[in-house]
Image (tube, rainbow, N blue to C red):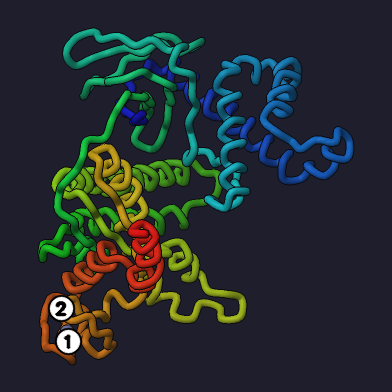
Amino acid sequence: MLNRGYKFRLYATDEQETLFGQYAGVCRLVYNLGLEQRRNWWRLFRANTGNAISYPSQARELTALRAEFDWIAAVSIICQQQALRDLDKAFGNFFAGRADYPTPRKRGLNDAFRFSGRDCQWHKLNAKWATVKLPKIGEVKFRLTRAIPGTIKNVTVTGDALGWHVVFSTEVEHTAPANFGPAVGIDRGVVRTLALSDGTFRDMPKERLNVLDRRARKQARKLAKCKRGSNRRNAARKTLARTKAKIARVRLHWNHERTTEIAATHGVVALEALKTKSMTASAAGKVEEPGRKVRQKAGLNRAILNNAWHQFEALLSYKIAERGGELRKVNPAYTSQCCAECGTIDKASRESQANFRCGHCGHTANADTNAARSILRAGTQPAPRIAVGRPLKRELKRVA
Ligand SMILES: [Zn+2]
């Protein structure tokens, strides 16, 4: 089974957009109330009932909440249940160690609500336009820019500074083909976004991103000067949000294009397992060392975030899997200091940001290309311990 999302711009009437805002607001409230309940009341709840707070217990309380408040009952219960399911999943991920502790949803950042697919019918109006029927909201037009294959599992309406969109999440029967494509190692960097082991590079449209980034910072300064609660401040906030949404869109588009290209032409992709999260977290400075080198790190962090390596990895991982290929993560230790020709690890070999010169065999290369080749080797060669240890035993057993 293959899960995909298809996103389209919605062209709603003013009344519908008001409803969207209302729906997103109520669903956010339900999610945040549920989060607060789990965070603050789980002990008391267990003492009283002997059970943990769960999706079923929260769904029951939702029914009571709806009976009490008309404005909550005015929004489809399906969307509210979906919000509670999201919360349940977020806690599941947290307890399994896959994610951080769930945080409250924020207005303007998490404006979304979801229906189940069977409640929303859509049909084509003509070659370019289609309409989707959302429960209690009605028919909403959208630009049909591509086909929607498969069974629609659910339909999400999301809003950001660039407007409202609809996402159809689908499920398609799929058997991955055998993939005999070549293997490639990729080094993700700040100066060159992607360096491939075949010696080629893929760079983000940095000029465009820098222009947008400068604009965003200017707008943020302007916003800081506006008086709290003023109309001017509200307008400045919206302008900044639009710019930030544009930056995100440029990045996503680029990541989509590059991951499609790389997944289509390769069978195995090796990447460094990067701890991007902890690297970005350190810039704020710790209590003991408030803001040492913060300025310097802030530049790197912005670049890391700009490059959106996590997004790249997430997109690449599903695209390569559906083509029968494989994404391998390798230990990032020494990949930038290791010679791709002879395997010698030497800090001094990395002459500069761009140049690598091996002190042992004299191999010279672009430093990022060399790192990409080291990553490829780490991802395609079995680790020494396994090579001489366990498989040998198994080999002997099989012979006997
Ligand atoms: Zn060497």
What residue appears at the point 32 percent right and 24 percent down from the top-left corner?
Answer: 172
First reached walking from the N terminus: tag 1 or tag 2: 2
Badge 2 amino acid: Glu
Q: Could you tell me residue 224's position as x and y percent? A: 47, 57
What residue appears at the point 68 percent right and 24 percent down from the top-left corner?
Answer: 59
Vertical comparison of 95 with 352: above or below: above
Image quadrant occupied by the C terminus:
bottom left
Q: Quadrant of residue 368?
A: bottom left
* The label number, if any, that marks residue 358 in the structure image: 1
The residue singled out by tag 2 in the image is 341
87 and 170: which one is in front?
170
- Disc 1 crowd, CA 10 A, few/some/many (<14, 14-19, 20+): many
Residues at discs 1 and 2 in contact (Cβ within 8 Å): yes
What residue appears at the point 36 percent right and 57 percent down from the top-left corner?
Answer: 398
Compute the Cα span from label 1 to label 2.
9 Å
Q: Could you tell me residue 390's position as x and y percent? A: 40, 66
Camera-near label (1 vs 2) is 2
Instruction: Indicate left or right for 127 with 291 as reference.
Output: left
**Mark 2 C-beta closer than 8 Å to ligand 1:** yes
**Mark 1 C-beta closer than 8 Å to ligand 1:** yes
Vertical comparison of 183 with 56: above or below: below
